[in-house]
Amino acid sequence: MAYIVGADSYQTRMITTSLDDLIDKDNSVRVIDSYVDSLDLENLGFIEYSGRNRGQSPYRRSDLLKLYIYQMFLTDFINIIF
């Protein structure tokens, strides 16, 4: 597919550690990532990009769902603290 794809979390750049190494092993991001990856998004009604549309390629639906869930998690966490 012609999605906008971010950098691989295991790839090293100028910093000698990978993004995966910078995230704690018990961070909630890992749970959200694994959960969304286990879902069958097409079966849940997410429309797959066909690659025939004009303009900028969209982000992967799974990446957007991960961001949405993480944002909801942070919002609830912040509301509990304050």
Image: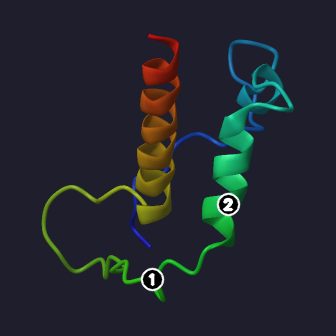
Q: Residue furthest left?
A: 54
Name the quadrant containing residue 7.
top right
Q: According to the image, label 1 marks what residue?
A: 44
Residue 3 vertical position relative to residue 27 in the rendered view, above or below:
below
Q: Nearer the viewer, residue 21 or 1?
A: 21
Q: Position of residue 57 (x, y in %)?
A: 28, 59
Q: Residue furthest right?
A: 25
Q: Position of residue 66 (x, y in %)?
A: 51, 50
Q: Nearer the viewer, residue 12 or 65?
A: 65
- Residue 40 lies left or right of residue 46; in this view the side is right
Say which residue appears at 57% left-offset and 81% top-offset.
40
Secondary structure beneath label 1: loop
Tell me the crowding category of disc 2: few under 14, some 14 to 19, or many 20 or more residues within 10 angstroms, Cα based: few
Q: Residue furthest bottom?
A: 43
Residue 68 vertical position relative to residue 61 in the rendered view, above or below:
above
Amino acid on which disc 2 is placed? Tyr
Say which residue appears at 14% left-offset and 60% top-offset.
55
Amino acid on which disc 1 is placed? Leu
Q: According to the image, label 2 marks what residue?
A: 35
Residue 63 vertical position relative to residue 28 in the rendered view, above or below:
below
- Residue 5 lies left or right of residue 30; in this view the side is left
Q: Position of residue 81 (x, y in %)?
A: 52, 13
Q: CA gap, disc 1 to disc 2? A: 14 Å
Residue 39 vertical position relative to residue 78 in the rendered view, above or below:
below
- Residue 46 lies left or right of residue 69; in this view the side is left
Q: Decide which of tag 1 and tag 2 comes sooner along the chain.
A: 2
State the quadrant of the N terminus: bottom left
Q: Position of residue 5 (x, y in %)?
A: 48, 51
Say which residue appears at 73% left-offset and 43% top-offset.
30
Secondary structure beneath label 2: helix
Total number of numbered discs in the rendering = 2
State the quadrant of the C terminus: top left
